[in-house]
Image: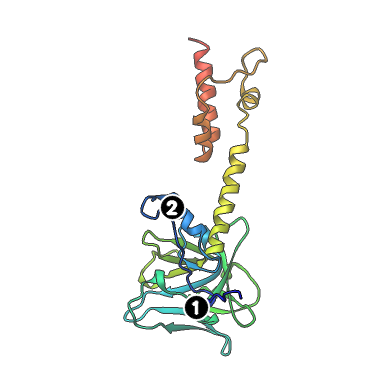
Amino acid sequence: MDKVRSTKLKFKGDKTKKKRKREDDEGGPSRLRRMEDEEEPDTWVMPESATEIRGPTFIVHPSDPSPISVNFDATRNRIILHPLDKDSLPLIDRVPTEISQVWVITRVAGSPTINLRTGTGEGKFLSCDKHGIVSADREARGPEEEWTPVLLPDGMVAFQNVYENEEVGFRERFGVKIQSKYKKEAHEEKKKREAVTELTVIDEAGTNRVHQAWGAGRSIVSKDDKKELKRARKEGRLAEALLDRRSKLKSDRFC
């Protein structure tokens, strides 16, 4: 007779304990990345960059004596600031316990801005008007429904809208938790962008042929290391670096 295995009842969002080999022998970023890869897709984690803020999101304000979660009451169709329990749990250990605490974030294509939509009810968009009044009753997206997340040095997040240009104060600082699978999605997108950049060939000869008025029709290129060009491309100053190299070639011609 087969032995029946007993399993613990697990709820969505519960953390899964993992057994890791050689935990004391390995460390550093690679170990941290491996630990993230082992996380359940729905595990709530803190973002490490603004581009990772996407998908289901839990937003908490570090008020005293009790933190406050930003909720949406679908029955009254309004935003509710809901005090959490007064225990000493740090933000990293807090997770949403009901759907009203969850907002769904989508990124605006080609822009650092995001849209926040209610996770319950009819999915209305969070907006802020020119008077600073925040509501969640818009069915369509526009400039007032766009927010720019700013990741602060201490890991907190500020959400700036089209009307805000002020410095971030205590009232504008929020703790944010996202799901692990969306953080991984952001990492994969970043890797793809970097791969495309690396595959882009720097055509120094073709550029010199366009701008070079000397050389008897021949395209002459610099013999200097091209690593500097790759570095300049990453820093957004490729055209300037190519110009410097062409200028040096022209001056060397008269030496």
Front one among 133 and 41? 41
Mark 2 closeness class: few <14, some 14–19, many ≥20 residues within 10 Å: few
Front one among 250 and 220? 220
Picture quarter with the N terminus: bottom right
Mark 1 closeness class: few <14, some 14–19, many ≥20 residues within 10 Å: few
| 193 lies left or right of 33 | right
The image shows residue 138 at horizontal and vertical percentages of: 62, 77
* Label disc, if present, on residue 31 of the rendered structure: 2
Q: Is disc 2 placed on a helix, strand or loop?
A: helix
Kind of residue indicated by mark 1 = Ile
The image shows residue 42 at horizontal and vertical percentages of: 54, 69
Q: Residue 119, relative to residue 146: is it above or below? A: below
Q: Residue 124, relative to residue 209: is it above or below? A: below
Counting residues from the start of the chain, the first of labels 1 and 2 encountered is 2
Kind of residue indicated by mark 2 = Arg
The image shows residue 174 at horizontal and vertical percentages of: 42, 70
Report which residue position mark 1 lands on. 133
